[in-house]
Amino acid sequence: MTCLFYLFVLIAVTGPTVFMWSFWRDAKGRQWNYTTDTSREMYVDVVKTLITASGIGVALVASASGRALDSIAKFSARVGVVSLIVCISASLVTMLALTRGHERARSRNIEAGRSGEEGQLLDFELLFILIPGGIALASFLVGILFLGRVTFHT
């Protein structure tokens, strides 16, 4: 059963990595690295949801910390909380990078005399969004898996 659990953890890390890689691949191969007000708002809403859900998970563990837990449950609770805190931190970085990257891309478009509604992200701007975004998503999934594991060992 432990091997199956860690297989799920591996999938929870690999899945977001592949997902974020697909954004990078499409940006490089198809020039799909444009940002609009609507897309920025959509992704910021996703990041806000990760922050909220992670905060709720950490609060639930904190409220249940008075119960007696076996060593596996204690370890799982610690890893889960740390993962969710990493998610919150990476999500904040992602949100700031999304907002700043969008503003820079829009400003470049305005300077070039084109529409001010969208803009093309540079490679480092896109990476600065994708890397913390991938870390946030993976750490959220890992945190939820470990917190779910606590219920089986209490």
Image: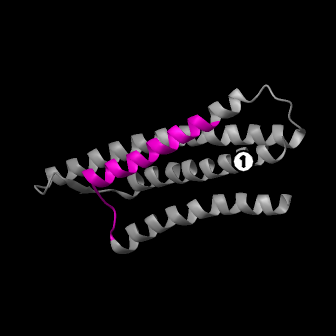
Kind of element beneath mark 1: helix
The residue shown at (69%, 27%) is 63
The furthest residue to the right: 70
Q: Quadrant of the N terminus?
A: bottom right
Q: Position of residue 94 (x, y in %)?
A: 45, 45
| Number of marks present in the image shown | 1
Q: Position of residue 139 (x, y in %)?
A: 62, 48
Q: Is 34 left, or right, of 69 in this rendering?
A: left
> Is 118 situated above or below 22?
above
**What secondary structure is the magenta-colored segment mainly?**
helix
> Is 21 situated above or below 109?
below
Report if residue 122 lies within the magenta region. Answer: no
Report if residue 40 lies within the magenta region. Answer: yes
The furthest residue to the left: 113
Q: Position of residue 104 (x, y in %)?
A: 28, 46
Q: Is 9 left, or right, of 94 in this rendering?
A: right
Q: Quadrant of residue 9?
A: bottom right
> Is 86 situated above or below 123?
above
The residue shown at (10%, 55%) is 113
Q: Which residues are magenta?
A: 31-57
Q: Position of residue 109 (x, y in %)?
A: 18, 54
The furthest residue to the top: 66
Query: Which residue, given by chain and number where applicable, does mark 1 sit on?
Result: 148
The residue shown at (31%, 55%) is 39
Q: How is the image coloured?
A: one colour
Depth order, front residue of 104/138: 138
Q: Is 137 left, or right, of 82 in this rendering?
A: left
Depth order, front residue of 73/139: 73
The furthest residue to the bottom: 29
> How many other residues sit within 10 Å of disc 1, few (<14), some (14-19) or many (≥20)?
some
Q: Amino acid at mark 1?
A: Gly
The residue shown at (84%, 40%) is 154
